[in-house]
């Protein structure tokens, strides 16, 4: 079985990697079934968090105010992961956010992964819930829910437990993680000028940093403003 890997988990502003941002990264490096190292960082998403995200994670805007942005965190994260296989609970979700960030910063990130959620669905179909916290409770695994490092560590322990109980070469083999994303260019100066004029004209207070937007994000915001307020 695969007993050397990096378990990865993220906290984000929402569930859509095309629209949402990373706010926390946690990763646990495992060697021969034992934790060898860990990586954790808050990430400033350039926008204010929703009340739901704050309540779910315990992370608030004050905690992120002085946190590095994803461009500062990405290289250390990719170095930490190195050539490892990724393990996580719904690992494609976490991979997709990191893949988007990597592509936007000109870095390669192609990985194979092992998804503990998929394994739980196959081997524990009768459980009422296969959420990470429910599975950790079922197996008596210590777990700090909805914080990235705690979730990464719990997913790692869950994977080892599932492998102990159910391992077979086919189902537990690492599989290519596939998420297609195109590089997004940063917001242009003319876009920022147009957006600031619209915000000022309609007296709109924003909960994001205009300078950190991409061109696509700026266009979507302006389209939304024009649709709501007209020209």
Image (spheres, rainbow, N blue to C red):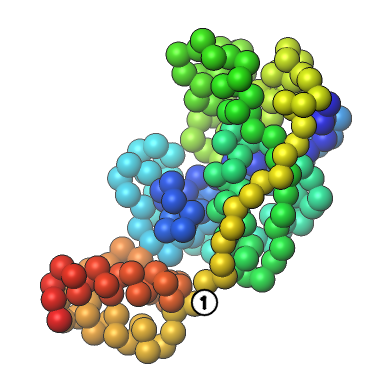
Residue at the outermost front position: 170
Quadrant of residue 227 within the rendered picture: bottom left
Q: Which residue is mark 1?
A: 185
In this picture, residue 205 sits left or right of residue 73:
left
Q: Residue at image x 82%, y 31%?
A: 2
The answer to whether one can see residue 63 in this image is no
The answer to whether one can see residue 2 in this image is yes
Quadrant of residue 229 within the rendered picture: bottom left
In this picture, residue 195 sits left or right of residue 79:
left
Q: Residue at image x 37%, y 89%?
A: 190
Q: Position of residue 77 (x, y in %)?
A: 69, 55
Q: Tag 1: Cα neighbours inside 10 Å, few (<14), some, or many (≥20)?
A: few
Q: Residue at image x 44%, y 51%?
A: 16
Q: Position of residue 9 (x, y in %)?
A: 59, 41
Q: Residue at image x 57%, y 70%?
A: 183
Number of labels in the image equals: 1
The answer to whether 14 is drawn above or below residue 180 in the figure is above
The answer to whether 102 is drawn above or below residue 155 in the figure is below
In this picture, residue 100 sits left or right of residue 108:
left
Q: Pick the quarter of the image with the C terminus.
A: bottom left
Q: Position of residue 142 (x, y in %)?
A: 60, 21
The answer to whether 46 is drawn above or below residue 51 in the figure is below
Secondary structure under the numbered disc 1 in the rendered image? loop
Q: Nearer the viewer, residue 80 or 177?
A: 177
Quadrant of residue 140 within the rendered picture: top right
Q: Nearer the viewer, residue 107 or 70?
A: 107
Q: Nearer the viewer, residue 53 or 121?
A: 121
Q: Nearer the viewer, residue 71 or 68?
A: 71
Q: Position of residue 1 (x, y in %)?
A: 83, 26
């Amino acid at each position: 079985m695969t007993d050397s890997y990096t378990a990865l988990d993220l906290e984000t502003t929402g569930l859509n990697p095309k629209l949402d941002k990373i706010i926390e990264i946690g990763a646990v490096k495992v060697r021969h079934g034992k934790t060898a190292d860990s990586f954790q960082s808050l990430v400033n998403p350039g926008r204010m968090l929703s009340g739901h995200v704050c309540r779910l994670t315990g992370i608030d805007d004050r905690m992120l105010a002085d946190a590095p942005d994803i461009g500062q965190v990405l290289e250390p994260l990719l170095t930490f992961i190195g050539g490892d296989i990724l393990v996580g609970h719904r690992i494609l979700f976490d991979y997709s956010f990191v893949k988007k960030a990597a592509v936007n910063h000109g870095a390669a990130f192609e990985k194979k992964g092992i998804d503990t959620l998929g394994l739980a669905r196959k081997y524990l179909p009768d459980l009422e819930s296969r959420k990470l916290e429910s599975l950790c409770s079922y197996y008596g695994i210590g777990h700090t829910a909805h914080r990235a490092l705690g979730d990464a560590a719990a997913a790692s322990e869950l994977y080892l437990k599932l492998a102990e109980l159910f391992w077979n070469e086919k189902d537990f083999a690492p599989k290519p993680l596939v998420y297609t994303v195109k590089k997004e260019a940063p917001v242009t100066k003319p876009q920022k000028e147009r957006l600031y004029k619209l915000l000022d004209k309609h007296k709109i207070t924003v909960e994001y940093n205009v300078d950190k937007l991409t061109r696509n994000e700026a266009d979507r915001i302006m389209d939304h403003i024009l649709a709501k307020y007209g020209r």
